Amino acid sequence: MYIDTHCHLDDESFAEDLSQVLSRAAEARVEAMIAIGTTADSSQAVVRLAQTHAPLGVYSAVGIQPNYAGAALASDWDRIVALAAEPRVVALGETGLDRYWDHTPFDVQQDYFDRHLRLSAERKLPVVIHTRDCDADILESLRTAHARSGPLLGVMHSFTGAAETAAQCVAMGLYISFAGMVTYKKSQALRDVAVGVPAERLLIETDSPYLSPHPFRGQRRNEPALVIHTAACLAEARATSVEELARQTTANARRLFVLG
């Protein structure tokens, strides 16, 4: 059995066929999926999806993604705090920092990231962390939170950073999740990083509808059922069986997100 720890099921590309997407996930033995919020409205939507599709193993995470933080209304953070108490909300995020895009001033990103980290420590909910082109900034913020509250609870999602960054995140308590990018032919360096992640801190995800894994890259929209290809790639890289990789990552996801 597999768990897709990061998918955007509220994306408009799923609007017409979400039932079929969830059925295909079940057929692929994906027993749980975490639908991730990126804005207050998106977070409201994934909470509703998780509650509607609970029998199919859908859970949710609520938060404001850094590239949307600049457009957030003053009341949006209060909505996130309230949504965090809803049934089947198992995480906060996605949050984090991003220097690739310039949609949100960096100090505003840092403010919202810190809010998520503080709420995570207060509510004992894991935080789902996005980072792009700013590993040093992320580590600085994480060290500050770690010094303030102790071991961190959360995951570096769709990880593409260096081995040393992964090691420092693990040392602070975090898990490392890999998406479809790890399957690409040009991604040997990332596979090497994945090999070094302790088995008990490894997670898998799709980040769907983005980042379709090989052999579907550029050919079809990503969806939770395709997480099995990322699992197979990681199993090969780590010289273990797909069954063991699935067992370990599923146990890890259940532990981190306290899935029922």
Image (cartoon, grey):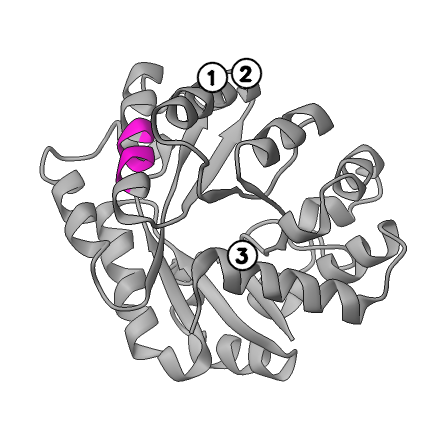
Density class for disc 3 (Cα within 10 Å; few <14, some 14-19, many ≥20) is many
* Left or right placement of residue 216 versus residue 127 in this view: right
- Vertically, is 69 above or below 199? above
Query: Which is more toward the observer, 146 or 22?
Result: 146
Q: Which label belongs to residue 208?
A: 3
Residue that appears at 53% across and 56% down: 208
Label 2 with label 1: CB-CB less than 8 Å: yes
Residue that appears at 69% across and 58% down: 219
* Left or right placement of residue 88 versus residue 25 in this view: left
Density class for disc 1 (Cα within 10 Å; few <14, some 14-19, many ≥20) is few
- Vertically, is 254 above or below 233? below
Q: Which residues are magenta?
A: 113-119
Question: Which of marks 3 and 2 precedes in the sequence?
Answer: 2
Which residue is at the far front?
Answer: 150
Three-letter amino acid code of the residue under disc 3: Ser
Disc 1 to disc 3, C-alpha distance: 29 Å
Magenta run includes residue 186: no
Q: Nearer the viewer, mark 2 or mark 1?
A: 1
Residue that label 2 marks: 136
Residue that label 1 marks: 140
Query: Which is more toward the observer, 220 or 68?
Result: 68
Q: Please state the horizontal and vertical placement of residue 117, each as a whole percent of the image.
A: 34, 34
Label 1 with label 3: CB-CB less than 8 Å: no
Instruction: For mark 1, give the secondary structure.
Output: helix
